[in-house]
Amino acid sequence: MANIIGIPLNTAVFIGFLFSLSSTAIVLKILQEKGEISSPHGRITVAILIFQDIIVVPMMLLTPLLTGQDENIWNTLGILLIKIIGVLIIIYLLAIYIVPKIFQLVVSTKNQELFILTTIVFCFSVAWLTSAIGLSLALGAFFAGLIISESDYSHQATANVLPFREIFISFFFYLCGIFIRSKFCC
């Protein structure tokens, strides 16, 4: 189809990436407001949203390759795979040995502000780590969220961050609008 309308394959794949995803936050909020999360179509929708959230990671990793700046795509994929494995090992070690001890110390202080600050600093640190080795910030934030969600303090972290959800969603769409405007408008 892309050949028929004159769109290069890499551009068509990227456009397909964009059209294949939906906003988990918005859809979940609508389902919650209507009380339909536990309905059959609500459960199917949630399953699709979870799959989209998982598949977005490989999409983010493949997007830079679609620009066609590198002549040897297999070399680039190999280096990318080595980086991902390295980051996964570091994150696994963090999740098993370091993060639980840090959060245990922070919780023992019984200071809610320190807990929120530690959670945010941890998320930004993992995002910076992935960015520093050439992967995306979003991938790092995703990994940090996975680590925190698997910790013993995931419910406390969720409860502390939940009030900021609407603000973060608003910032996300605002920044997307600015990005799109800067790329496609005069």
Image (cartoon, rainbow, N blue to C red):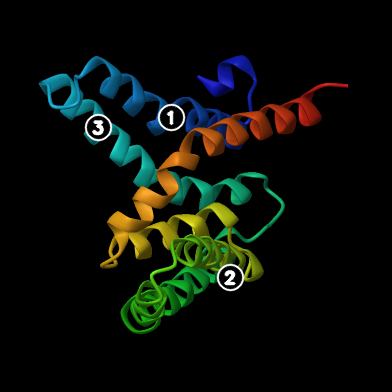
Query: What residue sits 38% from the left and 32% below the top?
Result: 24
Circle 2 residues within 10 Å: few <14, some 14–19, many ≥20: some
Helix, strand or loop under label 2: helix
Query: What residue sits 50% from the left and 56% below the top?
Result: 141
Which mark sits nearer the N-terminus, 3 or 1? 1
* The quarter of the displayed image where residue 76 is located: bottom right
Q: Which mark is residue 180?
A: none
Query: What residue sits 68% from the left and 57% below the top?
Result: 71
For the residues marked 1 and 2, what is the alpha-carbon distance in whole angstroms?
26 Å
Question: For mark 1, what is the residue?
Answer: 23
* The quarter of the displayed image where residue 27 is located: top left
Identify the amino acid type marked 2.
Answer: Leu
Residue 110 percent location from the top left of the image: 38, 70
Residue 28 percent location from the top left of the image: 32, 28
Specify the quadrant that holds the C terminus: top right
Q: Left or right: 54 with respect to 6?
A: left
Identify the amino acid type marked 1.
Answer: Ser
Identify the amino acid type marked 3.
Answer: Val
For the residues marked 3 and 2, what is the alpha-carbon distance in whole angstroms?
30 Å
Helix, strand or loop under label 1: loop
Helix, strand or loop under label 3: helix
Question: For mark 2, what is the residue?
Answer: 129
For the residues marked 3 and 1, what is the alpha-carbon distance in whole angstroms?
11 Å
Q: Left or right: 167 with respect to 44?
A: right
